[in-house]
Amino acid sequence: MEQAQTPAAGKKILLLEDEEMLATMYKTKFEREGMEIDVASDGEAGLAMAQAENYGIILVDIIMPKLDGFAVLKKLREMPQYQATPIIMLTNLGQEEDIAKGRALGATDYLIKANFTPSQVLAKITNLSSAPNP
C-alpha cells in the first residue's frame, strides 16, 4: 500500500502525551500518512528528545508527569532551534485562561482534544506545514 505524501510528511513530529491510548492513536494515524513521529510520555523526556533531535512540529499535552506542557512550551521557545517551529498545545484544558497562557508562552495553536479527531489534528499540521514562513 502506498503512503500518501502530505506537505508535513518530510517533517519529524514530536508528540508529548502521557495517555498511552491517545499517543498510540496519533502515532498510528500520522505514520499511515507517511510522517515520522516520536512520542514522549512526560515533559522531561520530551524536552530531552527535543534537544537530541530537530523536530519540524511539536504537539504538547498540558497535564503530564514531571514537567507540565506550559513549562515545556516555555523551555522549547527558549531554544534557538524551536523559536519559529510550530508548537501546538493538544490538551483537554479548555478554559480561557489556559488558552491565553498557552498563546502568551508562544503556542502556534491550541487544540482541545475532545473537539478534534486525529484526522483533524493531522489537517491542522498539514496546513501549518504548507503555509509559507513569514
Image: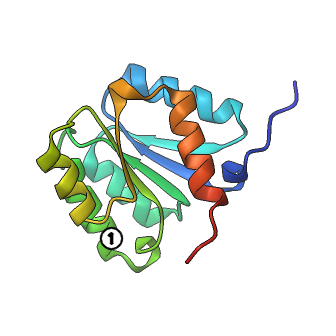
Residue at left 70%, top 35%?
33
Residue 27 visible in this rendered orientation of the protein:
no
Q: Position of residue 36 (x, y in %)?
A: 63, 45
Colouring chosen for the image of the structure: rainbow
* In the displayed structure image, the side of residue 51 where residue 73 appears, left or right: left
Residue closer to the observer: 130 or 36: 130
Q: Locate residue 67, reporting x and y percent.
A: 18, 50
Reading the image, the residue beneath label 1 is 77
Q: Which of 7 and 97 is in front in this view?
A: 97
Image height of 89 relative to 27, above or below: below
Residue 105 in view, yes or no: yes
Q: Residue at x 48, y 66 (%)?
A: 85
At label 1, counting other C-alpha atoms closer than 10 Å, the crowd grade (few under 14, some 14-19, many 20 or more) is some
From this view, report whether residue 87 is shown above or below residue 37.
below
Name the quarter where the C terminus is drawn: bottom right
The residue under the point 36% across, 75% down is 79
Q: Of all residues shown, which one is farthest toward the top?
A: 21
Residue 61 versus residue 112: which sits nearer the camera?
112
